[in-house]
Amino acid sequence: MAKLLTCALGICASLLSQTAVIAQDRDQPQNVADDTIVVVGSENAESEIIEAAKRVSPDLHYDRALPRYIDPLCLAVLGFEGPASAGIKQMIDERAISVGIQVAPADCRPNALLVVVDDVPAFLRQAIDKQPRLASSAKLTKAESDYADGQAAVTLFNIETRSKFGRKGFSDSNSRASRISPAHSKAISSSVLTIDAHRLRGATYRQIADYGAMVLLGHADGGIWTMDRTPSILALFNHSIKDAPARLTPFDEVYLRALYALPLNALPRSLPVSIKRELDTPAD
């Protein structure tokens, strides 16, 4: 699994004809990493935030540890002009650091990819044809189905079972399971977020970066989000982009902080407690 994303990025390099190089908009700041957008919104009720958290990743197993990045994040961004790719990567790296995820040095082997393409199904099929370990046939079928149902972005995650403390090999001395915590953790060993270039019109680099951060770092499903109760950047492609959040919302920030504040072997039912703790912690 360690070489999985390296292979995937090799595939991307050989399929650059499939990627959509998004030119920098003249209305975007010259330094795309600058965050000049200010969002004003009402605070969500605590019960709504906790309930919304259950919708972020609805397919979690109640008896398995919450998936997250345990290894340092090594992100690659493809499909934009060079300065934009670098700026989006910087913004996502900053989000990772803010919740306690280590970011790997510049010469690292990527374990996360955000790519923008003109033809999502064709890219996925060719990528997996060249590197079958990128995803199972079932995962590919689901991704194609999600895209056919109207999703602008699809994500492939590979989850690796680790020891309670995140070590590879799935064993720790004196490590035992209990009713409230398993004897293992779940590491996101690789992830690929593929976005339809035709659905990006009007989106800012900050929106794209924060959507990528929430999906990749939060193991989130952006295809099911609605803005009826709890605003989230996960709804970026589910509504008119001009009406979507301009960046991570208060809910998104609380969710990511709460997830990465938990022990590595924490179960999904621990997340609401962690969210409550984050909500009760005064801001710096």
Image: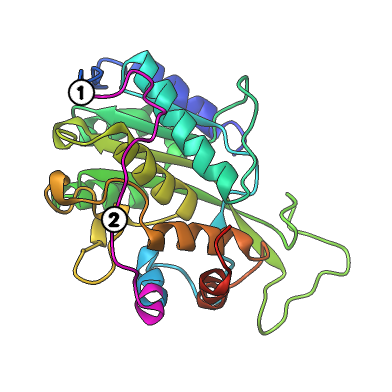
Task: Report the magenta stretch's main SS.
Answer: loop
Residue 218 shows in the view: yes
Q: Say if the magenta span includes residue 125.
A: no
| Relative image position of residue 162 (x, y in whole percent) | 68, 56
Q: Amino acid at mark 2?
A: Val
Label 1 vs 2, first from the N-terminus = 1
List the residue tagged with mark 2: 40
Q: Is residue 26 above or below residue 252?
A: above
Which region shows up in magenta? 27-49
Q: Residue furthest bottom?
A: 179
Q: Secondary structure at mark 1?
A: loop
Is 145 situated left or right of 75 in this image? Answer: left
Q: Residue furthest right?
A: 173
List the residue tagged with mark 1: 27
Identify the residue at image location x=28%, y=68%.
230
Q: Is residue 172 above or below residue 177?
A: above
* Viewer-nearest residue: 266 or 274: 274
- Badge nearest the viewer, 1 or 2: 2
* Viewer-nearest residue: 153 or 277: 277
Residue 136 shows in the view: no
Q: Is residue 203 above or below residue 230?
A: above
Identify the residue at image location x=75%, y=59%.
165
The N terminus appears in which quarter of the rendering? top right
* Viewer-nearest residue: 229 or 9: 229
Q: Amino acid at mark 1?
A: Asp
| Relative image position of residue 70 (x, y in whole percent) | 64, 49
- The residues bearing labels 1 and 2 have C-alpha atoms spaced at a distance of 22 Å
| Relative image position of residue 139 (x, y in whole percent) | 36, 50
Is 178 situated left or right of 7 in this image? Answer: right
